[in-house]
Image: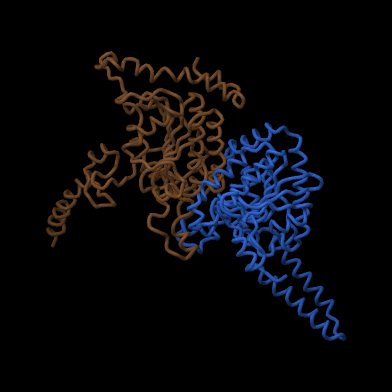
Chain colours: A brown, B blue
Amino acid sequence: MNWITNYVRPRINSLFSRREVPENLWTKCPECGTMLFHRELADNLQVCTNCDHHLPISPRERFDALFDGGIYVEVKVPEVLADPLNFRDQKKYPDRMKAAVKKTGEKDAMLVGEGEMAGTDIVAAAQNFAFMGGSMGMYVGNAIIAAAERAVEKRCPLILFSAAGGARMQEGILSLMQMPRTTVAVQMLKEAGLPYIVVLTHPTTGGVTASYAMLGDIQIAEPNALIGFAGTRVIEQTIREKLPEGFQRSEYLLDHGMLDRVTDRRKLRDELVAICRMLMKQPPAVAGTLPTPEEPPAAEAGEPEAPEAAADPAPQAAPAEAETAAGSEPDAGSKAKP
Amino acid sequence: MSNYLEFEKPLADIEGKAEELRALARANEEMDVEEEAAALDKKAADMLAELYKSLTPWRKCQVARHPDRPHCKDYIEALFTEFTPLAGDRNFADDHAIMGGLARLGDTPVMVIGHEKGHDTKSRIERNFGMARPEGYRKAIRLMDLADRFGLPIITLVDTPGAYPGKGAEERGQSEAIARSTEKCLNVKVPLVSVIIGEGGSGGAVGIATGNKVLMLEHSIYSVISPEGCASILWKDAEKMREAAEALRLTAQDLHKLGVCDEIIAEPLGGAHRDRAGTIERVGKALQEQLRVLGKKSPEELRKERRQKYLDMGKKGL
């Protein structure tokens, strides 16, 4: 008996567990069931290569793909009070936080970065659904305010990628107060005449949609993302009927006039570049914008001024816009690059 | 008193007995029950004082939702003159869950907007139990805009379980409507005073409650989610609403400590429903005082201070 439990069984177990190891390298598409190799999936921005289903993507992965060469500087977010209400449900709030920090390696549910996207200065903020459902608490509020302030300082667009179940209940009323707080952040951008572009990703619901995520100058959604105020279960219980197919999904919202566009994640960057540059009155970006060191700009006859043009108009455009914003923002001019 | 809350049961028994005795006496003239009835009254009064001395958060939720509690319409009828209701969002419909219009508070013309829950089955259905649809918020935006252009102070009376979770509401952009309404609150250059008179239910409340000053009645509540909703999500058991109400810190007293509520308006002993006129009068006085102070500020100051108030929020915990 002993040798069975001590020897045979571990061997059998190890055989099975060894077979499980490669599973980490493979992800099963929740939509079509195709096994996707992790590297291939990452190269495809976490979009299924078979059915184009959009899987979750972390803020860092997104930023790596969004910013030129994956280079960006993280914008510092002011610290918040930890557990202001001493909230405790079945677990203590600080314990839930610790678990989320451990799971994601992030401080909280939003990452803010600044850098260039096809030579266009931008600030980007991305919500992390893996961190307590992306929930909006004081940190997320501070992150959005910091992002808006930085964008105003740099006089550049803010692109926000939303993903959240809603407000963070563990911060009680203070999480609800992030609705007006983040709205103030959006107003800062509007008054400075700077674009605020929202990309809604799966899922964006609750108080998040009822504030900053629906106040964009341009509203884009990734395909088939769940976007809505109330949860489908709550609605079904309230109205006592089955909801139609595709209810609260991106395409449904587009049909009902609630969005500007539904865009595939792989085409998103080009679209964002085009929109930002048009709204900022900058010339079009040049295809394959990154001027690589081995290829000097002079290599192509028609293009030499292009990389410069990409960098130049910003300072030119800035003072012009500073004038229009001067009424409400007296020091906008001094913040603009000379 | 027809409606007793669950925790008021013992009180109901005593008050019922006193009432019965008096009814008996009325029927039979030789009976003298006054002494006994008075004793019962005294006992009931003591019990009421004891019950309301320290209400638990969950009991406060029940008081805040009490069907006899004065609602928006009651305040408007009693406090304002020349109330002229204004309807419609100019897009789709008129939402009866949010009412509003021009009125005078004392001599001052103002815009008053609020959630109305209704007081009987018919009116509750018509008012959708105070749960507004996008049209309601879009009407509020329109009225706030009007007030802003003509320099009229805005008063909002908040009393909603939350925005309506319905199919049409979602299709017509419930979240966008609330977001824009909050944005409008933050944009206006006139005084905006909000009073939470009953339930401040999540985003549905915020949409019209983002004021320069937020006042709360003593037993009103204001929360990110209903205790029942929170319990079913975090405790996986909707019956744990007592614990959830405790944890959410949704009482006027806690919100005052957190800087979310600027002033608590005391309620008569036993809650607003036991002395409706008295409660309404107190709210009127508080509103007049707030408008007097805010009226001295410049339009720019009003907007700037309102925004700063929200930016600064969350710097102190409990």
Q: Which of the image's four quarters has the C terminus of chain B? A: top right
Percent coordinates x, y for residue A43 in the rendering: 25, 36
- Residue most extreme to the right: B30
Q: Quadrant of the N terminus of chain B?
A: bottom right
**Total residue callouts:** 0
Residue A282 to residue B155: above or below: above
- Residue appearing at x 65%, y 62% in the figure: B118
As drawn, is A127 to the left or to the right of B12? left
**Which x, y percent locates residue A285?**
36, 25
Question: Which of these two is toward me, A224 or A41?
Answer: A224
Vertical arrangement, residue A82 with respect to residue A311, above or below: below
Q: Where is residue A123 in the image (x, y as percent from the top left)?
A: 44, 29
Does residue A184 appear anywhere in the picture? yes
Query: What residue is drawn where x is 50% and y is 49%?
Result: B173
Residue at position x 38%, y 54% from top? Answer: A246
Question: Residue A121's quadrant in the figure?
Answer: top left
Q: Is residue B223 visible?
A: no
The spot of residue A116 in percent (x, y) is 38, 25
